[in-house]
Amino acid sequence: MTMIEKILARAAGRDHVQVGELVVCEVDMTVLIDLQSATMWASPTRIADADRLAVIMDHAVPAPTIADADGGVRARAFVQQHASKRFFDVGRHGICHQVIAENGLARPGEILTCSDSHTCAGGAYNNAARGLGPAEVYSIMCTGKTWFQIAPTVRYELLGERPAVITGRDIFLHIAGTYGDATNHNLEFGGDGLAAVPMSDRRTIATQGAEISADFTTFPADERCREFIGAHSDDRAYEPADPDPDPDARYRGGPRGRPVHARAPGRPPGRGGAQRAAGLADRAPAGRPVLHRLVRQRAAGGRAHRRRVARRPPGRPGGPADRHARVPGVYTEAIRRGYLEAIAESGAIVTNSTCGACFGYHMGLLGPARSA
């Protein structure tokens, strides 16, 4: 079996699963976000397990509409009624994927579900994390279970030494540009080059799995991962999936997957496909200047990315010449390290931590013919 097949087999109480099978799995952690209580909510009479539930206020903070404010009231009443201990209300809130990471909610070898499409970020921690529809997440909250169909897996072997200028976003853009979408497939990462990829970049890669329609994106629980979980999770035992494929493991693209070189073979530094893709990502459509740039926590807004933005020279895309809407997650740390000072001095607007700007809901709109 592959890594994701091992996780799903454990959760289904099975010794073995194979591609095409439908399996009913116990879900280890269900995360509700504020939009759920604001848009389609009926207070349940019971839930499966309050210890396997977290509620995070993140998309509509502060509440931009009366409906969102009412949703917050319902969320707080629900948490009190069912004695849920993992409630991240306004003041403790943040982008749900960052909150999940910083509080160790996505643990190796387990399953996490949430109604946000980028829930797959949790795959960085050897977790089967999946974004599902609000009705399905509501059902999981009440029953503790859901079903999945075992999809084929594509494995990417990261090879070689990663140059310092290559980020997780670059690696993903190279893979997406080379191999295209992964609809109805799982993604799995391994290889000797993975040891040099920090957890923040792994989360960026896992997050972007949703952009190529992958079912799950999973990394192994190596030393870096275990150190992170040890520092952020509680002392409950977990059972990571064995990162080595079983002899019967089958991958699309070859028996051991597709190689991804940190530096394209035969090309000098600075000429690789990853770096070309990164350059394109900094350009506005049709050559228009970038008026507004959102540095977000969702895909690449961690501490390392804030540091890169703060150090970019004036005039470079993403540097002080641009206006940024900052969405900090570990806000006080960014202040201590001086990142927000440097970004604010460039004319940025520092906002509270919310998904509002990311999906165009609130925290600023663009006028006609403006680029973000």
Image (cartoon, helix red, strand yellow):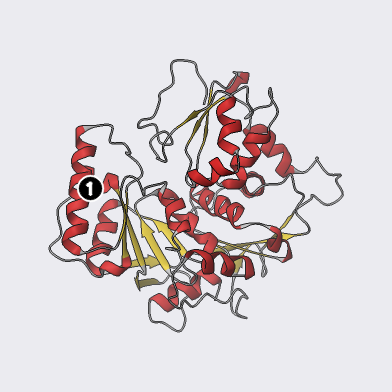
At a point 78% along the width and 59% down the height, the residue shown is 160
| 320 or 125: nearer the viewer | 320
- In the rendered structure, which amino acid carries the disc numbered 1? Ser
Circle 1 sits on which residue? 37
| 158 or 124: nearer the viewer | 124
Give residue 326's position: percent from left, percent from top: 50, 34
Residue placed furthest toward the top: 368
Residue 178 drawn above or below residue 28:
above
50 left or right of 221?
Answer: left
Quadrant of the rendering where the N terminus is positioned: bottom right
At a point 23% along the width and 44% down the height, the residue shown is 72
At a point 65% along the width and 39% down the height, the residue shown is 308
Q: Is residue 39 visible?
A: no
Determine which quarter of the picture holds residue 15: bottom left
Label 1: how many Cα within 10 Å (few below 14, some 14–19, many 20+):
many
Q: Is residue 241 visible?
A: yes
Numbered-mark total: 1
Residue 369 drawn above or below residue 84:
above
At a point 45% along the width and 63% down the height, the residue shown is 104
Give residue 18's position: percent from left, percent from top: 48, 74
Determine which quarter of the picture holds residue 335: top right
Q: Tag 1's secondary structure?
A: helix
22 left or right of 316?
Answer: left
Residue placed furthest toward the front: 336
| 49 or 129: nearer the viewer | 49
Give residue 123's position: percent from left, percent from top: 51, 61
Give residue 285's position: percent from left, percent from top: 58, 24
Residue 58 drawn above or below residue 2:
above
Residue 88 drawn above or below residue 283:
below
250 left or right of 256?
Answer: left
Residue placed furthest toward the left: 45
